[in-house]
Image: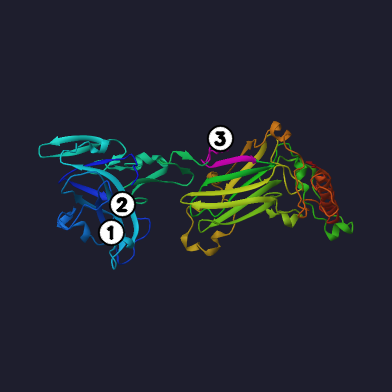
Amino acid sequence: MFNLGQLTSFQVGRNYNISWHLAKTPQRQENVKIRLLDYRGNELESERMPLFLGHGVTARQMTSAVQQSVEISFPFECRNCTLLIEKIRAQTNTDNSSLERSCAEVDISDTAPMNCFGNGIWEDKGSSGICQCSHGFSGQYCQYKDDCADDLECGPNGKCVANAIRQDHKSCFCQFGFFGTNCERNCYSSKTLNTEETDEGDRLHWRLVGNQLEIILDFWTTHLHKWIGLGWRPLQIPPSCRLFPQMISSLEQKNVQTSGFSREWLEQPLHPMECVDMIMGSIREGNLLHIEDLYSRDMSSPLRDSLLDGEESLSAAYGLQTGNRTLLMFRRLISEIEPTDHPLGPGKIFLLYAKGESKIGRDEKLKSENDYQWKYHGSESTNRGHIEIEFVNQSQMNQIRVPLIHFDHSTESGHNSDGKDPTKNEDDIAHQLKEKRTSKMKMNKIHHPHYHPH
């Protein structure tokens, strides 16, 4: 036996509660046996001088392994001894049948001081007494160290639960977004993430990840909010962006006179939904995510980028929904490389946010499975809003190569088939890709005549 440096003192004849943690769920025909060993490792307890459990039962007669605590008393002194607890198979009941074991170094005497194991103050009350435990400790003799005494000690973001992790031990369980012994730590640390809170109490978090921007939407939602979304555009984008995308019809190809666009319409200030690059997502069953990269030309339903000759621009995404909070993360290049995308920096940009209509006051008879479909966010001010925000400043952007595009044309040797390092001409490849997309847009008669963001 090696010395752990922790010696627990007990008094002969006094009752104590002994508890233990089982590493495995107990099965049928598995029991627990308690033994006392002297400093040489020899067993001291015998049928003649047993360790007494509650109700006159001896340690040898203890049965169910499901039981994780028991009241016990020591009938004799044992200095510098070891209390051994073993889970065994009932059929064998031999020393080599032990499935699990745990031990503690103990000192049992007639005159052991009642010091509440150093975790409290003993108040003598004649023939008996009571321990007044220090903060963080509980039990008859303050033998248990807890993480919390009640919900208040887990803060506003947690709950104190007994016996959930260990027997006779209270632990904090934290709400989504928080962790720590007392739920004191925020997952969205200001050391790693920037945060902006909207007037509606929703939160946006973001950080730079190499040449990309990671954005996290952390929104208050109910089961009625079926989606959340985010959109953005440059602050100085001209109203003529409304002309994108303009699909040239067969009539126009034949030079048929049409009404066209009025100059007055083109010069009107932009509505928040016009010319917006968007991300929308829905989460079902807690962690099933559907997310889309969209573009909103006007006050109609946003369209997928792929329908406007664009592409899915996200490099990563995940979604979670717990209680009344919905979290949606996506990651994308800061710069844009196609007309359906807008840059996320540098400098301030126009940003809008929204979530599905809560349908307050709606007739429940109209409820259907289609409620999960993406519908208009409604007129409630708490369902949408817009702000100006700076995700990336110019200094940060200067440290990033633009355009930030990477291609994997390498073989196992890390080079192209012609033997050249593909990273050497990355800018040339990016330029060729943009030229190719520009040509493709012209071929499809889709153009953006007055706004050239690149």
Residue at which label 2 appears: 20
Could you classify mark 3 by the number of other residues whose Cα lies within 10 Å: few (under 14), some (14-19), or many (20 or more)?
Answer: few
Q: Earlier in the sequence, mark 3 or mark 1?
A: 1
Residue 191 numbered mark, or none: 3
Write the start and end of the magenta stretch as one range.
188-208
The tag earlier along the polypeptide, 3 or 2, is 2
Residue extending furthest toward the right: 255
What colour-coding does the image apply? rainbow
Whether tag 1 and tag 2 are in contact, CB under 8 A, the answer is yes
Judged from the image, the secondary structure of the residue bearing numbered disc 1 is strand
- Badge 2 amino acid: Trp
Work out whether mark 1 precedes mark 2 in sequence or the reverse, and give the earlier one: 2
Q: In the image, is residue 195 part of the stretch drawn in magenta?
A: yes
From mark 3 to mark 1, how far is it between C-alphas? 49 Å
Q: Secondary structure at mark 2?
A: loop
Checking the image for residue 32, the label placed there is: 1
Instruction: Give residue 189's position: percent from left, percent from top.
Output: 53, 38
Q: Quadrant of residue 149?
A: top left
Asked which quadrant contains residue 452, the reply is top right
On whether residue 161 falls in the magenta region, the answer is: no
